[in-house]
Amino acid sequence: MTATQLSPSRALRPTAKVLPEHARGHNRSLVLQTLYRASGQSRADVARETGLTRVTVSDLVAELIAEGLVVETGQREDARPGKPATLLDFDRGAFQVVAVDLSDDSVFRGAVLDLGGAILARVEVALAGSTGSEAIAKVLHLVDSLVAAATAPLLGIGVGSPGIVDLEGTVRTAPNLRWTSVDLHGLLAERFEVPVLVANDANAAVFAEHSFGGVDGDIMLIKVGHGVGAGLLVGGRPLFGATSAAGEIGHVVVGTDGGPVCACGKTGCLEAWLAAPRLAARIAAITATGAEADAERDTVLREAGRRLGIILAPVVGALDLSEIVLSGPTELLEGPLATAAIETIRTRTMAEFTGSLTVRMTTQGQDIVLRGAAVMVLSGQLGVS
């Protein structure tokens, strides 16, 4: 087993105005978020940080201690007169989270995490070309194994799935898995009887980058794997779109000059240019050697980056983004591809406004969707991220 401790940086913003009947839940989340981001605070510290009264904080802390989410860690060493303050901490071991990543073309991945984001156990299930009901059965088998590996009560299950996923957790369509209207939320909630959150893998990934990647502003994350998708956070809020299809850039046709045939049947989709298996296959087909092979490889990657830049330029112009993050195989995305993408964006937008635009690789590595799935559960169940 390996353990990777994450350091949360920013909380996702609430998506609605706080109504009076929801005030206690909102205040509870404020207290939890404050202790989640900085341990070793007293009740008075929390009151100052949140703007809540000391009476309210004391009442909420008593409730959270009773639930096992907050613990007292001792008294602060203080030279000032009076009784030393009792320090508090968010108990990261009180519950565990099961996180699932279905975005890879060859394997379904899962992990058990504590509430601080440390990965306690991992499980993988080989996809072996499975689609349809066979792939669903492998998801259930994976989650069975993860639930069995948990050593504390489960807070919930988070899933990052390819395709278009609606707000109820139904995968409306995932062409590479041949899924149509698969109610993953319902299947998992009924089987395991714990809260379940399901989202598109790119949306899960952008949650991880926002919460743990030090992002300080609006962000668009491009997830490149078996397919291509994007997650958007603007003003600290995710964009899902009217039909839950925001960020589905993979099947947008790039240009009018043809191109590779896509799995969806169209010609020249971004996914046909950029998906990792497609890029790897074109590079593997290079027959030249030495410097000539390197040049041909760079040409393939630069063309894919140029096509990505064509897609992203109007998005950058419309939303005034300052940062685009790439998630996927570093050996394909970093270097010529990323450089070509940003060059193309700048030539197709107003340079005085996009001169500071950056295109970079994620800081979260291969676990980005798993971490994002865990953030979904933490945010949905406790209001922390």
Image (cartoon, helix red, strand yellow):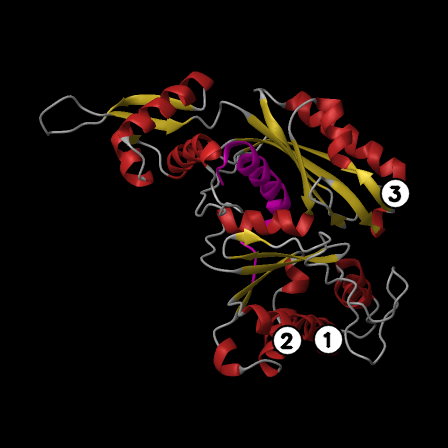
Q: Secondary structure at mark 2?
A: helix
Q: Secondary structure at mark 3?
A: loop
Q: Residue at x 83, y 43 (%)?
A: 181
Q: Which residue is mark 1?
A: 303
Q: Nearer the viewer, mark 2 or mark 3?
A: 3
The percent coordinates of residue 133 (x first, y second) are: 89, 36
Q: Earlier in the sequence, mark 1 or mark 3?
A: 3
Image-based side of 14 in relation to 154, left or right: left
CB contact under 8 Å: marks 1 and 2: yes
The residue lying toward the viewer, choosing from 246 and 220, is 246
Relative to 22, residue 254 above or below: below
The percent coordinates of residue 188 (x first, y second) are: 74, 29
Residue 98 lies in quadrant: top right
The stretch of residues the image draws in magenta is 360-385
Q: Residue at x 88, y 43 (%)?
A: 131
**Majority secondary structure in the magenta region:** helix
The residue lying toward the viewer, choosing from 282 and 49, is 49
Extreme residue in the top direction? 66
Tell me how far mark 1 sits from mark 3, CA to CA: 31 Å
Q: Which mark is residue 206?
A: none
CB contact under 8 Å: marks 2 and 3: no
Identity of the amino acid at label 1?
Glu
The percent coordinates of residue 157 (x first, y second) are: 65, 31
Q: Which mark is residue 131?
A: 3
